[in-house]
Amino acid sequence: MKRVSRLLLFALLLLAATTPAFARKARVKIINQSKWEIHHIYLSSTDNDEWGPDQLGEDILEKGHSLTLTGIVCGDYDIKVVDEDGDECVIEDVTLCDKHWWKITDDNLLKCEGYTNN
């Protein structure tokens, strides 16, 4: 009986450690320091080929403004930003964890492959 209890306890601890509800969460402040309005921001774990939902929804991240995302599971992400002209920029392998801030600058956007300055 003691062996079964130990196995059950081990299984519960293993489940708790691997369940997303118990994963460390990040609070990420995104600051738009570019000269463009940002209309869409998508996150994708670097292990995933699919983009998550638009973090802005119907909102726009205006020039000089910021947005704080909460409840993001700590990890490495690719971030796709779409500006007012529909230009897309993907920044790869960004670590998001704990209290973190991330600035969108003109340099970030203009260095993106395929990004155009209309």
Image (spheres, rainbow, N blue to C red):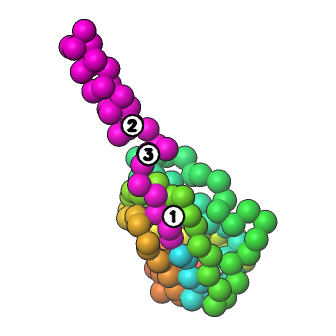
> Is 5 situated above or below 84?
above
Residue kind at label 3, given as amino acid type: Phe
Q: Quadrant of residue 36?
A: bottom right
Distance in Å between CA atoms under marks 1 and 3:
24 Å
Query: Which residue ends up furthest to the front in the rendered image?
Result: 2
| Residue 112 placement, left or right of 117 | left
| Residue 89 point in image, percent of width and height | 55, 70
Q: Residue 81 appears at what percent x and percent y? A: 59, 69
User: Counting residues from the N terminus, which is met first, the one under dot 2 or under dot 3?
Assistant: 2
Residue occupying the point 32% across, 32% down: 14
For the view shown, which residue lies furthest in the right direction? 58
The image quadrant that residue 1 belongs to is: top left
Q: Quadrant of residue 54?
A: bottom right
Residue at the (27%, 27%) spot, across then down: 10
Q: Secondary structure at mark 2?
A: helix
Name the residue: 65% across, 54% down.
53
